[in-house]
Amino acid sequence: MDTFIQQIINGLVLGSMYALVALGYTMVYGVLNLINFAHGDVLMVGAMAGLSIIKFLSVVAPELPGIIKMIIAILGAIPVSIAVNVLIERVAYRRLRNAPRLAPLITAIGVSILVQTFAMKYWGRSPIPFPSVMPLEPVQIGGAVISQTQILLLVLATLSMVALVLLVEKTKMGRAMRATAENPRVAGLMGVDSNKVIVATFAIGAALAAVAGVMWAANYSSAQFAMGFVPGLKAFSAAVLGGIGNIYGAMVGGIVLGLIESLGAGYIGDLTGGILGSHYQDIFAFVVLIIVLTLRPSGIMGERVADRA
């Protein structure tokens, strides 16, 4: 039972990070019908920017509490990720909005490689250790433990998702986003500036990815230029699992995928008689993606953001 509780905690932590990144995928798809495969690299940029800020604060203000350093790092990483994602939209995607779908897909892959290359040149190709700024004493939950970094991650992820729901459901920008997703031309006739809405969508997705990126690096104590590739693919799988284009589906898909991956990693050795170990946990996201696309292509919730406009 202690092992089960521990794997549930690990799954919630992992799933929260997947959900934050999946929201970026699903929001862009809901508005533009575009899969931004460079979104994982926006997470990487946020993580590397946060790491640089943490290192700077450790030198100029070592007496600051760890949680304050983490919050400052996240707040500093958010505008960096937003700038990168908005630049990607402006340079790479805007002129391809009416192009065949294959064109923006290939462009997204090229942008991903380009962002990774610039990051490698700036931060280097070797993994960089993420300083341990949060207290190291874990919190006991039954027979399981959760680190204070993971508690902060869960709190920030919950607050971010609640804030996003309120923005989409209760604000003028949210209504404009839903209207643009439903029909950009009609929304334009009603006075909605679709360009501003699309830029806002990319910015919001980037902000969520920055939070996930800094917390990912803090949780795993490392960051590097290629770190966004696998989380990006898994978050895309989570978005498809929940229902691509549905913000609630992205949240549910991220949490479910994190739990599946964590529980699978914990018990796969017993289930396979020791043939497979926990290091095979990456296969679960893609097995789930194949199953969902085969049995229920619309995902668990299966409704696009546009349908609620």
Image: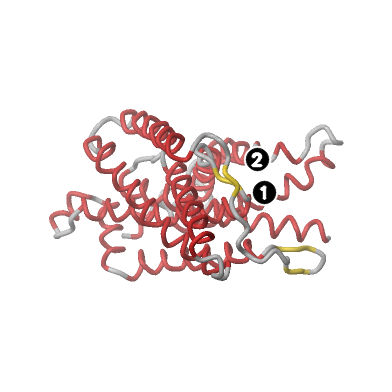
Which residue occupies the foreground of this view, 128 or 89? 128
In this rendering, the answer to whether 27 lies above or below 274 is: below
Q: Position of residue 20 (x, y in %)?
A: 49, 55
Residue 260 image label: 1
In this rendering, the answer to whether 276 lies above or below 251 is: above
Q: Left or right: where does residue 93 sit relative to residue 244? A: left
Amino acid beneath label 2: Phe
Mark 2 touches mark 1? (CB < 8 Å): yes
Q: Quadrant of residue 67?
A: bottom right
Amino acid beneath label 1: Ile
Q: Left or right: where does residue 30 sit relative to residue 188? A: right
Residue 284 image label: 2
Classed neighbour count for the residue bearing mark 2: other residues with Cα under 10 Å, few (<14), some (14–19), many (≥20): some
Label 2 residue SS: helix
**Colouring scheme applied when the structure was drawn:** secondary structure
Q: Left or right: where does residue 202 sit relative to residue 185? A: right
In this rendering, the answer to whether 100 lies above or below 271 is: above
